[in-house]
Image (cartoon, grey):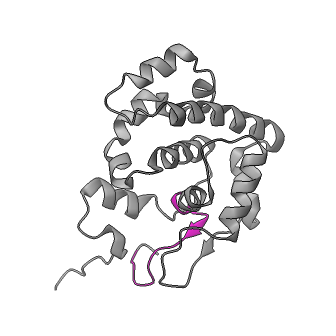
Amino acid sequence: MKKKEITRCEWVQNKPDYYMDYHDNIWGKPEYEDQELFKWLSLEIFHIGLSWQLVLSKYDQFMAAFDDFDIQTVAAYDEDKVTELMENEGIIRYRRKIEAIIHNARQVLDIQNEFGHFSEYIWQFTNHKQIINHLNIRLTKSPLSDQVTKDLKKRGFMFIGSVTIYSYLQAIGIINDHDLTCDFR
């Protein structure tokens, strides 16, 4: 008996194993844990202007450099830590992005104080339901990403825009944009 070939989204074809692992196990799957939500937001910020493959290839280095994206820890980073991160050749060394990650960790703490969990806040925009797109077109932003971006900016978040937030919403599974033929849909 022949084993069925796995069908993945077109954009992940011929990518390295770590990229396919991201597609298969993370992208489009609902995430509710605050630290994971913060981590993916941070990595999406590092993605701005660069390839996602580059960011994922540095995943382990990012995790080590940013203390596993522990929100409390990152929020407490000072100028010495920024200098240390700027000297870390294993990550993307862009000062404004690094400073935005630290600043945004503080904003996540404020949201946790208001909502109990960052997850409660971010999932409220869809009434805690996943949006499953039924079109085989690749969107880069939507009215939802516009709305979330506007609210995050109002709350002081830095280095974000609707395209970045759309990608983030895909990463954390609020939006499931897997191709219609993808086995991971």
Residue for point 39% across, 37% down: 92
Query: Is residue 170 placed above or below 8 in the rendered structure?
Result: above
Residue 27 position within the rendered picture, expressed as x and y whole percent measured from the top left: 47, 61
Q: Quadrant of the N terminus?
A: bottom left
Q: Is residue 76 magenta?
A: no
Q: Residue furthest top?
A: 80
Give left or right: position of 49 versus 145: left
Give the magenta part as a residue range: 170-183
In the image, 56 versus 116, the foreground residue is 56
Residue 153 position within the rendered picture, expressed as x and y whole percent measured from the top left: 73, 47
In the image, 18 versus 102, the foreground residue is 102
Residue for point 71% across, 36% down: 107
Residue 86 position within the rendered picture, expressed as x and y whole percent measured from the top left: 42, 24
Task: Report whether residue 72 is seen.
Answer: yes
Query: Is residue 152 placed above or below 105 in the rendered structure?
Result: below
Residue for point 69% across, 63% down: 146
Q: Main secondary structure of the magenta part?
A: loop
Q: Is residue 174 magenta?
A: yes
Say which quarter of the image contains residue 158: top right
Query: Is residue 185 placed above or below 166 in the rendered structure?
Result: below
In the image, 1 versus 148, the foreground residue is 148
Give left or right: position of 55 versus 77: left
Task: Report whether residue 120 is seen.
Answer: no
Query: Is residue 7 placed above or below 87 in the rendered structure?
Result: below
Give left or right: position of 77 versus 143: left
